[in-house]
Amino acid sequence: MPSHERRRIHGASNLHAVRDGTRVLRTILTEWRWRRAAAGQGDRSYQLAG
């Protein structure tokens, strides 16, 4: 199916692929580290006892 795009009505694009992609990746990694640390709170007790 062909795609018909119209000209932008309000100026130039606000998309900055590298900057926005880096920001998204940083947020994903931060969430991943936070969840991993939170999940590891209960798992570390066996390591400290031994």
Image (cartoon, grey):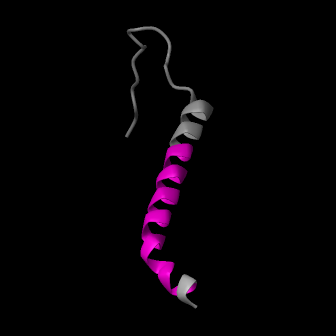
Question: Residue 49, percent across and down?
Answer: 54, 88
Q: Quadrant of the C terminus?
A: bottom right
Which residue is at a point 60% across and 31% down the rendered structure image?
19
Residue visible at 45% across and 71% down in the picture: 41
**Main SS, magenta residues:** helix
Queried whether the magenta region covers residue 45, the answer comes back as yes
Q: Residue furthest right?
A: 18
Q: Nearer the viewer, residue 3 or 30?
A: 30
Farthest residue, direction bottom: 50
Left or right position of 47 against 3: right
Q: Quadrant of residue 3?
A: top left
Closer to the camera in the image, 5 or 40: 40
Q: Position of residue 15 (x, y in %)?
A: 51, 25
In-front residue for pair 23/43: 43
Residue 11 magenta-highlighted: no
Q: Is residue 24 above or below residue 37?
A: above
Q: Residue furthest front?
A: 49
Q: Position of residue 31 (x, y in %)?
A: 46, 53
User: At which x and y percent is residue 8?
Assistant: 42, 13
Figure check: 28 above or below 43: above
The number of callouts visible is 0
- Vertical placement of 12 versus 48: above or below? above
Task: Provide the residue span drawn in magenta.
Answer: 25-47
- Point out the image quarter for the N terminus: top left
Q: Residue at x 51, y 78 (%)?
A: 44
